[in-house]
Image (spheres, grey):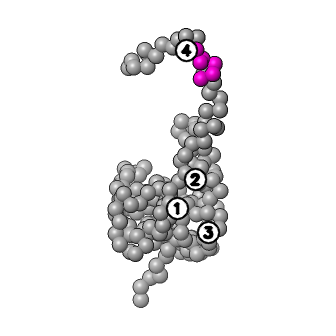
């Protein structure tokens, strides 16, 4: 008898590194993707799987600081990056997301279970994943992680990255203030090209 195959609900792909891995913090190659779920997604099956992983690792004596694999998308968007900038991930706002990881390449297929290429899997498309959940207690970090085993693209999609021109340039007044270019202030940009 085979083990039960665990599948996520349908979500939207973000940061797909499933064809070409990237180095993790330990310097090891890792394949991963985020999967973003809307408010209506039924995550009860995944929650039950995570609870089983906790029970297997700690039983009734669970530590208090267990890191959940379920993340707050609004918090991701509102948290400053290394440059202090926020609001860079509007597609995450109001959603729950997970990060699935694998130490080796995985199968990536379409709705007909046919293998697809990197060019056919873009951020914003809809997909589901086959996964497993394991608890960890390593280097002072305690939590449950989700291992990516396979990924299936379900439908096309892309994130809206268009810009509202009226809003983007609302404070730009140079076209009217300096309609006569002879009155525009002179700017010296020669230093920009110096090392």
Q: Quadrant of the C terminus?
A: top left
User: How many tags in the picture?
Assistant: 4
Point out which mark residue 41 bears. Answer: 3
- Up the image or down, 75 lies above or below 39; here it is above
Q: Earlier in the sequence, mark 3 or mark 2?
A: 3
Left-right relation of 62 to 18: right
Left-right relation of 193 to 98: left
> Which stretch did the figure color magenta?
175-180
Q: Quadrant of the N terminus?
A: bottom left
Assign a secondary structure to mark 4.
helix
The answer to whether marks 3 and 2 mark residues whose Cβ atoms lie closer than 8 Å is no
- Label 1 neighbourhood size at 10 Å, few (<14), some (14-19), many (20+)? many
Point out which mark residue 91 bears. Answer: 2
Task: Please indicate, yes or no, whether residue 62 appears anywhere in the rendered image.
Answer: yes
In the picture of the structure, the residue carrying the numbered disc 4 is 181
Q: Pick the residue in front: 83 or 126.
A: 126
- Real-space Cα separation, disc 3 to disc 4, in angstroms: 56 Å
In the picture of the structure, the residue carrying the numbered disc 1 is 12
The residue under the point 63% across, 19% down is 177
Q: Earlier in the sequence, mark 3 or mark 4?
A: 3
The answer to whether marks 2 and 1 mark residues whose Cβ atoms lie closer than 8 Å is yes
Left-right relation of 16 to 37: left
In percent of width and height, residue 68 lies at 58, 62
The residue under the point 43% across, 14% down is 190
Instruction: Nearest to the eye among marks 4 and 1: give it.
Output: 4
The residue under the point 65% across, 29% down is 171
């Amino acid at each position: 008898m085979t083990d039960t195959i665990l599948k996520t609900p349908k979500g939207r792909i973000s940061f797909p590194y499933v064809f070409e891995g990237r180095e993790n913090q330990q310097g090891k190659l890792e394949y991963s993707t985020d999967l973003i779920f809307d408010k209506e997604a039924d995550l009860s099956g995944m929650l039950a799987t995570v609870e089983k992983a906790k029970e297997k690792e700690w039983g009734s004596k669970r530590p208090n600081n267990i890191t959940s694999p379920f993340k707050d998308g609004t918090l991701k968007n509102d948290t400053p990056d290394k440059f202090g900038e926020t609001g860079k991930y509007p597609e995450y706002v109001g959603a729950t997301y997970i990060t699935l990881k694998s130490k080796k390449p995985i199968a990536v297929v379409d709705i007909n279970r046919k293998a697809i290429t990197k060019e056919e899997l873009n951020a914003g498309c809809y997909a589901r994943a086959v996964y497993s959940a394991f608890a960890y207690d390593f280097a002072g970090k305690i939590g449950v992680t989700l291992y990516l085993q396979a990924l299936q693209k379900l439908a096309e999609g892309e994130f809206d990255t268009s810009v509202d021109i009226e809003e983007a340039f609302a404070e730009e007044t140079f076209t009217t203030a300096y309609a006569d270019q002879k009155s525009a202030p002179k700017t010296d940009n020669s230093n920009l090209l110096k090392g």
